[in-house]
Image (cartoon, rainbow, N blue to C red):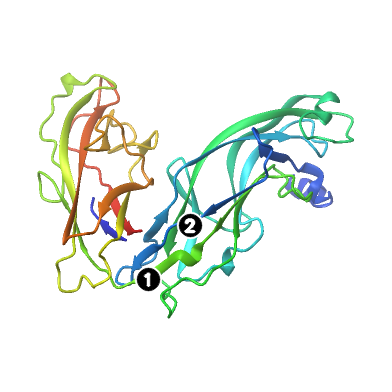
Amino acid sequence: MYQHWIKLLVVLGALLSLPQAALALSCKDAQTESVRRVISLTEDIYVSTGDITPGKLLWRSENFTVSFRCVDDHNYPGGESSYFYWDPADTMSQIDPAIAVGITLKSVNYQLIKGQHELAGPGTSPPATRANCTMYWNNSSAPRCATSQQVTVTFSVYIVATGAPPPASGQVNSLGTYDLFQIDGVGGLNDRPNSNYRAAISGLGRIHFISCNPDIRVRANAGNAIDFGRIPSSQARAGAIQRSIPFVVEVNMSGPNSGNQCSGRALVGSFSTSQPLQEGTTILPRNDSGFGIVLSDADTPTIPIAMNTAVPLGVVNSTTVQHDFIASLKWLSDTPRIGPFHATATIDVSFR
């Protein structure tokens, strides 16, 4: 993959004296009541040995959208939120040190650090009734249980290089199944088996480090940058596209150091940015700019590309692969800020 431009003590003591399950929540797939999903690498992933600096994106899954339902199975009538708890089985450290696995939520990448968690949404809420204790799969003996809530989340899985040397064989030797997260409540991990949804990853042995080092370039109307020119702010209409500029991502395999293992590989890109972001797709020069930049595939110009999602670029069967994109300036306000602006994006390219 390649990058381019573009009372605290008293309360704490009380909580520590409670059993772990006292504040636990049971959350399952709302449609199937499933508690497990294994995301498998079904295709071989090829990584250039010439570009394995820390944080380099090697692979990204499709987006998964799941609706969770949570029930109060441990007598917490006041209700509680649900969370993603990372690395619930403490297995991330068993993965080959050359790679790291993470989760993307709302275009934000999260490292899977044991003990850390991120808000998913509502879990349960008042009112609490005895009837709630036997709804859905709940079988609580509590006198009252909070009302079940449902939350829908979308996530993807990504794999990055850590900067550690790749395995000598060139193939990742992590053949197990590794739990990524568990959906649970404010009290931590539920201690009842098969009570909470977990997602896991397998097939990491499909990752191969190869000798393939193409030159990746962005070509636009200002070299590797896009120049929108002068635009009158008087034309601003919230929601409208003011101007669109084409650009090309070019992958060149003709260089002397390109290696000999590129042919036949499928190329996949993923855009990201360090700028403020709106709705996961609109890059803002600043939070109050009143306008932003939207990227789209030239074949589907009205569909914005979400940051940190996989975008097919083509298959390497010649010395050059090109893919056309469009950058559009979109008004977000009728009264935008005026003056010069700039915004940056990065495209990571990986092989499959």
**In this view, the mark in front (1 or 2):** 2
* 160 or 118: nearer the viewer: 160
Q: Are marks 1 and 2 in contact (CB under 8 Å)?
A: no
Q: Is residue 203 above or below residue 303?
A: below
Q: Which mark is residue 41?
A: 2
Q: Which of the 4 image quarters holds residue 352?
A: bottom left
Can you give x and y, in whole percent of width and height, for residue 331 in the image? 25, 26
Is 187 left or right of 262, judged from the image as shown?
right
Question: Which quadrant would the N terminus be assigned to in this image?
Answer: bottom left
Can you give x and y, in whole percent of width and height, for residue 232 in the image? 13, 24
From this viewpoint, is residue 280 visible? yes
Label 1 element class: strand
* 52 or 203: nearer the viewer: 203
- The CA span between labels 1 and 2 is 15 Å
Residue at 83% over, 30% down: 133
Residue at 22% over, 26% down: 241
Q: Residues within 10 Å of mark 1 (few under 14, many from 20)?
A: many
Q: Is residue 186 above or below residue 38?
A: above
Can you give x and y, in whole percent of width and height, for residue 142 in the image? 88, 34
Q: Is residue 206 above or below residue 19?
A: below
| Amino acid type, callout 1 | Phe
Q: Which mark is residue 67?
A: none
Is 183 left or right of 270, judged from the image as shown?
right
Considering every residue shown, the one lying at the far bottom of the view is 168
From this viewpoint, is residue 272 visible? no
Residue beneath disc 1: 209
Give whichever of discs 1 and 2 has the lower sequence position. Answer: 2
Residue at 82% over, 39% down: 74
| Amino acid type, callout 2 | Leu
Can you give x and y, in whole percent of width and height, for residue 57 in the image? 38, 58
Q: Which of the 4 image quarters holds residue 330?
A: top left
